[in-house]
Image (spheres, rainbow, N blue to C red):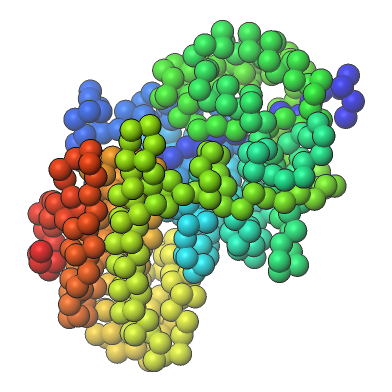
Amino acid sequence: MSKIERTALVVYGHFSQPPRGNPLTYEIGEEADAAPYKNWNERINATSYLPNAIDGNFNHISFSVSEGLMKWLEQNAPETYQKIIEGDQQAVAAHPPAGNALATAHNHVILPLSRKRDKCTQIIWGIAAFERHFGRKPLGFWLPEMAVDTESLQFLADAGIGYTLLTSKQLIGLPPGADAGPYRVELPNGKSIAVFARHDALSTELSFKVHNLGGAGHWAHNALSPARKSIGSTLLLATAGETFGHHFAGEDQFLYWLVQHEADKAGYELTSLDEVFLNTKPTHTVKIAERSSWGDQPALSQWFMGAIENGKDTTWKGALRRALDNTASDLDRVYEDLITPFGVDPYVLRDEYLPAIFQGQSPDDFIAEKLPKMKEKQRQQLAALLQAQRLTQRMYNSYTFTDTKLDGRQPRYAIACAATALSLAQEATGHDMNDRLPVDLAVVTSPDTSITGTDMLQDAIREFDLSLIKV
């Protein structure tokens, strides 16, 4: 495409909210700081999700929505939910099979920090959730926090995913004057996956300065139009969807004018990642920066063990992760002991479980089909342990480790998930599941608060009546 022709433009938004509230019922409850709304999901829906839906922005951008948020919208904001679905459907109708929506990890976990089997589960469950909502198989996949490693890409390719998107700084070997791509990443198993490269400078400007850009028309004329001289055929802008209306009030209108009017005036033709992927064969091979993300932290260390930086101490994250890892291991052992005698791989079974539930199968029917020789009592135990497995996956939601306060809502939610999962397993099997969590959480402390992990565990036990866990 020559410079006198139009340049393709993709605007991408990732929409997500941290899980909070009751781990079993998904009820968020009251959040006083979200006033005048009941909670932050309601508030952000009113200021961002619904306005963007009404504006028709989901019809014109590529996007992903975390499963926790998608489920909440389905149940609590059906108008918003339906317009998001319609935004993808109209794209598929116009350019089959290319849609606007991408899949994402089911519990919004930072995949490179996960165990191998958990990466597989998150990807398989994420694809199944996407298919439930959008009624089609996804072509692309959003990596939470844009955190990437080769193993995660290999599992994406194994699951049939065609592409993902990363920041330009995460890609090694981009050609001079590189555009959005797609580019090829060769994988150890002989497969490959396509990656798109975000234009980092313009995306960052949009993410953090949208209020000061003088409106969509001014920015398109003064920033996007000149950018056509230095990029190739496609420009990718990618940011958090909440930029438009939540982080910056009223800026759903910026997005509306940009994608529906001003980009065209600046010489761009709006398209989707799906459409570019289907119509453009990668001609250049690149490598990824292992264990990198959209941020600057080396090897994802701040999310893995925390840091002492700018007077802020978040090293409690390492101790919390150890407590959660021990909880997951204890629950895995009980789960494996129940299933292994029947000659079934417990983690293949786990991978298959949620897709079956999304397709309308009951847990009882699923277990009866997969393990017909199980006795009734064992089936009841397995149903509880599968629910516990779902809870352990939720513990590792990215927001648990991107929160900077130990006693924040997200670490509290992770601890509540751990306690609830152990409670379910103890009730189902009669095993004492209270061996390590209280001890592990006793060392989860921060100089910024007198609250400890043990205090938060006791709070969860009281709030959710987890009488089986004694502290």
Q: Is residue 96 visible?
A: no
Left or right: where does residue 174 sit relative to residue 412? right
Asked if residue 424 is positioned above or below residue 110 in the image, the reply reads below
Say which residue appears at 77% left-offset and 41% top-offset: 174
Say which residue appears at 77% left-offset and 45% top-offset: 173
Q: Quadrant of residue 247?
A: top left
Say which residue appears at 34% left-offset and 89% top-offset: 374
Quadrant showing the C terminus: bottom left
Q: Nearer the viewer, residue 316 or 220?
A: 316
Left or right: where does residue 190 sit relative to residue 355? right
Instruction: Pinpoint residue 381: horizontal percent, then vertical percent.
Output: 27, 79
Instruction: Pinpoint residue 188: horizontal percent, then vertical percent.
Output: 71, 66
Quadrant showing the N terminus: top right
Q: Is residue 423 visible?
A: yes
Say which residue appears at 43% left-offset and 71% top-offset: 350
Left or right: where does residue 427 sit relative to residue 368? left
Q: Quadrant of residue 198?
A: top right
